Amino acid sequence: MRGAKEGSFGYAACYALAAHAGRGAEWIINILIPCLIIASYVAYRESDYQLEKRFAGILVAIMAITALYGMLKLRQMQATYDAHCPPKDAK
């Protein structure tokens, strides 16, 4: 089973992306993903399966890159925080 820290890691990666990618990149990603979903659906309904496959592949690649970037940035932010965090007192 995944621990609480592991489970929340991917969710927090979205916030790391929003904090460092810039508002313009965030808007582009937020608009591009639904557009690709709709384009893939339209291609499917028109029986253009090659085009649907391309749209779906681009969508998966963008989402994977976005998640990977967010996770790597979050790890970097966590390392910086840990380095600057004052040591805890022994109990």
Image (spheres, rainbow, N blue to C red):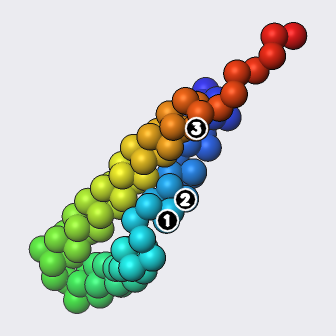
Q: Is residue 43 above or below residue 54?
A: below
Left or right of 36 on screen, residue 57: left
In space, the residues marked 1 and 2 are separated at their CA atoms by 5 Å
N-terminal label among 1 and 3: 1
Provide the secondary structure element on which disc 1 rests: helix
* Disc 3 residue type (three-letter): Tyr
Left or right of 79 on screen, residue 7: right
In the picture, the quarter occupied by the C terminus is top right
Q: Nearer the viewer, mark 1 or mark 3?
A: 3
Where's residue 55, x and y in %? 23, 74
The residue wearing badge 2 is 15
Crowding near the residue tagged with mark 2, few <14, some 14–19, many ≥20 C-alpha atoms within 10 Å: some
**Which residue is at 59% across, 33% downward?**
84
The residue wearing badge 3 is 81
Task: Give yes or no for contact between labels 1 and 2 (Cβ–Cβ under 8 Å).
Answer: yes
Disc on res. 18: 1
* Disc 1 residue type (three-letter): Ala
